[in-house]
Image (tube, helix red, strand yellow):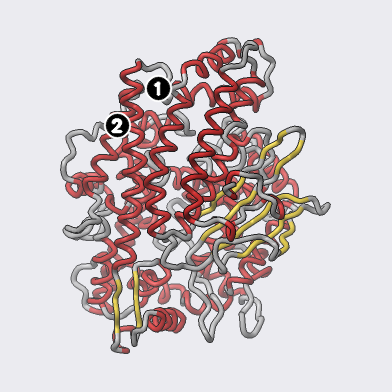
Amino acid sequence: MNVLNKPFETPFETAPFSKISDTDYLPAFKIAIEKAKSEIERITANPEPPTFTNTVEALDFSGEELDRISSIFFNINAAETNDTIQKIAQEVSPLLAEFSNDITLNQALFKRIKAIYDKKETLKLTTEQQTLLDKKYKSFSRNGANLSEEDKKTLREIDKSLSKLKLTFGENVLAETNSFELHLTNEADVDGLPEGAKEAASNLAESKGKNGWLITLDYPSYIPFMTYATNRELRKKLALAAGAKGFQDNAYNNENVVLQIAKLRHKRANLLGYKTHAHFVLEERMAKNPETVNTFLNNLLEKAKPAALQEFKELQEFAQEQDGIEQLQKWDGAYYAEKLKQKRFQLDDEKLKPYFKLENVIAGAFNIASKLFGLHFTEINTIDTYHNDVRTYQVTDTTGTYIAILYADFFPRPGKRNGAWMTVYKPQYVKNEQNSRPHISIVCNFTKPTKTKPSLLTFNEVTTLFHEFGHALHGMLANTTYPSLSGTSVFWDFVELPSQILENWCYEKEALELFATHYETQEVIPMALIKKIKESASFHEGMQTMRQISFGLLDMSWHGQDPTAISNVKAHELEAFKQTKLFPDVATNCMSTAFSHIFQGGYSSGYYSYKWAEVLDADAFEHFQEKGIFDNDAATKFKNHILSQGGTEDPMVLYKRFRGKEPQPDALLKRAGLIKK
């Protein structure tokens, strides 16, 4: 029998990665889909009248095997993919979309759910049960249960097409990322690069049987080159390659894919009775509608734009004064910003890196989680992993009770997509009075250790690790009954609060002194550097804020209006960027064709939520600053009302329970230096 279709007889029932071969996935999916179908049939064929337990609860616990296989497979597709896995993904995605529609378009099942929903006021349900019932009912109504048979058929076809298009989009971006290499053999061409970045580029070249240095579009390679390389022409070459992903005249062009996704999403929303895709999505968000989002983004833009324009003017003048640059271009931004930052704060990222050895930063994150939430992390080697780089930890509380399993995967490799993310291999839930604990993973792309140096993180990478670890805490501390309401299963404009709030500890002396020690001398990071880190935190915050707003507005331009008349991706994008444009446009570059967050990930109509969550996190952290950053009372309230509750209640209710009031944007604007403290 397929290893994926039976209970895992492994420590903590973790995924048996080494026993799974690529060819196991497709048959395992097919078996699990059939099992899940029969579980649904048992619910609909039940001769008893529909009750919360025999219908709503039974539905939430159905398909457990399928969910488990899906989480393993799609996590592998993101972190350790290959041609076979990608081919299977193309085959499996339509099957899963079809199965999902089999449920949401199942009239007999909907009839049972509706019967319970219609009398919910008389049922004496707990708050969590009410939320689950509401969510289940909406999952039908929002996915076509009230449609005619003809329209249901159309919906199925749209969903099948969308699942394939999203995969194609991601594969094209990955192929473009992997196909570009900047091979340098002249030492002058790597001038300005920090020693660690230079050594990593040399090691990469050597691993491919080449002399010199190899620079790629993977972030640990791309970012240092764009920030430090003195050769402007080479920065331009790299930036043009990065900006052209999915926008070139080749097999990986995403222009048509983008247009098809936007138009199909709109058609789907209309079919379901919504004005646009954004109206459909935002109904299930804190923001509720596109008008709120656009007002939110434009209000922030009004506050940030004067600062951004002033910062850009200063940067332009600085570049001209330094190197006679007449017009600042996109490939100059990071380079001159870093130089100006160093001049202003005498704060060199490279001088900070020795204080942020990866192992120390991990220990620091664990220590902070211990002080705040009473968690303990023990590295264990009894758990199977999908790659040798992956580390595994058993998480316990102060009484030694098992809380979670944590996987950590930190280094880039060819089969792994760019960026950083948190993911779940198994959610938390309570079944048969047993609290089944979660398996959580964080995945990053940090510089690998070299022959002479350990993995040393930039400060930006330190905050990235804390960010993903914040998501992981949300998953690990989950304490709900139902799997679909557990952990990070919350509104998308709320999900970034636990991750973004944790970044704040990276700027605090009390926290930094726990882990920021020089990897050679063990010297604790000097106070002067901590002061500079804090002072420089709001450096170019106007430009950074405007950049995030521009992405949010681009997202809303694709999804918050009727896209059927759009025929030119680039022209549409230029219009969307009009209010936020700083650098001259590059004709051969396009953002949308590689904007994976909204065309492949789950952020369509939701990119604004990063800024939305920043308002929440600044407001929430202000509470910790008032009480003390390791204050037990504040941490306990955050754990009890936010981290453990998942999606059991409306997020604003949970937030007010923690904070005592609704969030205000002032804390964010003060932190960003956009209004006076």
Is residue 386 left or right of 141 when viewed as pictured? right
Judge whether residue 655 can be spotted in this image: no
Residue in view at x 45 percent, y 33 percent: 287
Disc 2 designates what residue?
266
Is residue 20 left or right of 152 when viewed as pictured? right
Residue 55 position in % (x across, y down): 61, 20
> Considering only order in the chain, which callout, 2 or 1, is on the residue closer to the N terminus?
1
The residues tagged by marks 1 and 2 sit, at their Cα atoms, a distance apart of: 14 Å
Residue 662 position in % (x across, y down): 56, 35
Q: SS of the residue at dot 1?
A: loop
Residue in view at x 22 percent, y 58 percent: 589
In this rendering, the answer to whether 566 lies above or below 381 is above
Residue farthest bottom in this picture: 187
Judge whether residue 414 can be spotted in this image: yes
In this rendering, the answer to whether 240 lies above or below 258 is below
Is residue 331 left or right of 303 when viewed as pictured? left
Residue 51 position in % (x across, y down): 64, 15
Residue in view at x 44 percent, y 79 percent: 200
Residue farthest front in this picture: 1
Q: Which mark is residue 272?
A: none
In front here: 487 or 83? 83
Name the amino acid, label 2: His
Q: Which mark is residue 144?
A: 1
Q: Are marks 1 and 2 in contact (CB under 8 Å)?
A: no
In front here: 184 or 197? 184
